[in-house]
Image (spheres, rainbow, N blue to C red):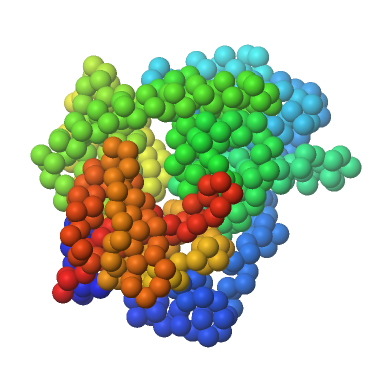
Amino acid sequence: MTGYLGVERSLTGRRWVGPSPDVTRHAEALVQQSGLPQALCQTLARLGVPAAEVETYLEPTLRALLPDPRSLRDMERAASRLVAAVSQRQRIAIFADYDVDGGASAALLIDWLRQMDRTATLYVPDRIDEGYGPNEPAMAALARDHDLIICVDCGTLSHGPIAAAEGADVVVLDHHLGGETLPDAFAVVNPNRQDEDGAMAHLCAAAVVFLCLVEAGRQLREAATQGPDLMQMLDLVSLATVADVAPLKGVNRALVRQGLKIMAQRARPGLVALCDVGRLETAPKSYHLGFVLGPRVNAGGRIGKADLGARLLSCTDPHEARAMAERLDALNTERRDIEEAVRAQALEQAEARGLDAPLVWAAGEGWHPGVVGIVASRLKELTNRPSIVIGFDGDDGKGSGRSVSGIDLGASIQRLTHEGLLQKGGGHKMAAGLSLSRAQLEPAMARLAELLAKQGADTLGASDLRLDGPLMPGAATSELVDQLETAGPFGAGAAAPRFAFPDAQIAFAKRVGSSHLKLSFGDGLGPRLDAICFGAFDGPLGPALEQNGGARFHLAGRLEINEWGGRRAVQLRLEDAAPATVT
């Protein structure tokens, strides 16, 4: 198949792929039936939205999409135990994972309990000293001083640690892939339990916690008691959903859409402080959750104090929140420096092994456990292959993996654990964690590559640039960008619309900062469009477009609104380009 606009190899080395004939026909039908703009219909057609569902898709509501929490196993039991602990004024502990999903899940419970006039002990394990999930010493210690322990974003595979919590009831609210048997907990609520039907497998842990609070609210109403306003908590659910790369489909779309509206009200001190240190001048969008706010919340668990993110998200004091947000911002900067050093070494290793293998992996002494997951993600993006990065401290290795669409990494990691090739491992389809010894490294990676190859990981092509169609600069109005936003939120499983601007003439190009490029371009028929390309001079785009010599280019990227001084202007976030003479 010929590349879109004839682009077989762009300046960044990618082939351009346009909409299929079926998607194009569907888009044309949507235009005729709905009267919506062509560009919006192209996006809806690519997302597979039927004509009859366009109106409800563009306005997702929780009323229409929120599932009955009781359809999840153990949910009624878990919620009733939470309600009983509140009514009986029992001592409650929350054991949370150290990432955004765990932090947001913990903050949801802390906020809800605070409004019910109860406090909870927060426990977040140290990534280096304790590793992921509940451990026996911590659970035994918590059980001595608490009546109820709620494990969020972890616990489904924690048989031993939960058994160690003698004298306390343990409730698990999780979404990681379950094993053949469940731990002996009071309740295990998890849409990825093996005895679930998978209808809610796309939920993150914070969404599972939210459903538990919905059910708790129902039980409170039955007892003639009013619970907290759960709608005001959707800001935390939306942050976790996007940051944990949960697919933005079904109820997840409504959770994120409504959560962004709540976040725009700037009522939660922790998120307000995060937005301020992240220098957000507009209401956050899903992009900001994943790339501005999420990494800062994660920074505490990666290289700082593990519970800092959860404490910030549950904080009620603006001054305290500001101090924590500034600390997380500094840690995030430090994390980037550490990550870059590990990334360079990991890429050199992976290249030596071959980037076209079914598994791309690297391992090194002293690589910080807090950045191996991010580096694995970078390798995955570069190679379009499942990737594993492992850091060793002596004989002990801790690693993280990231996968690509269609390849279930979590199930394969879990199988290796059952086969004794790993000390510990688990996760979900797109991400997993593991622990192993040096002696296990080579056999485990060989076996994992074999399992992933059976899923087709060795046949994946280089990552193509997928485009929704052509657009003229004059058609890129702020009204169109606003209309395209109604097809969002965009993220995992629902990529933001990306358009090609064919045969563009660059009128202005200037380097900004150390590596970015600003430019404006037109087609000679209408107004010009401004564009920004971040990191352009880290690769071939910057030099080629800055020194264009009057040549014309096909340009590709995503439209966005640039706001400053009270003005709104459309700009293209440029991602790729190719000479317009390509045939």
As drawn, is 419 to the left or to the right of 10?
A: right
Residue at left 64%, top 45%? 264
The answer to whether residue 22 is visible is: yes
Residue at the right extreme of this rendering: 224
- In this view, the residue in front, 326 or 64, is 326
- Residue under the image location 63 percent in, 43 percent down: 263
In the displayed structure, 543 sits above or below 276; it is: below
Seen in the picture, residue 30 relative to 559 is either above or below; the reply is below
Residue 16 drawn above or below residue 37: above
Along the line of sight, which residue is nearer the eye, 420 or 132?
Answer: 132
Q: Give the quadrant of the N terminus.
A: bottom left
Quarter of the image with the C terminus is bottom left
Given residues 247 and 132, the one toward you in this image is: 247
Quadrant hosting residue 22: bottom left
Percent x, y of residue 447: 21, 42
Q: Position of residue 145 (x, y in %)?
A: 65, 14
Rendering coords of residue 375 (x, y %): 30, 36
Q: How many marks?
A: 0
Instruction: Please give the name of the residue rendered at 59% of the width and 24% of the height, measured from the top-left corner.
Output: 322
Image height check: is 271 above or below 301?
A: below
- The residue depicted at 78 percent of the width and 47 percent of the height is 218
Q: Position of residue 302 (x, y in %)?
A: 41, 26
- Left/right of residue 315 with respect to residue 539 in the rendered view: right
Is residue 212 visible from the viewing direction of this image?
no
Q: Left of 325 or right of it: where is 558?
A: left
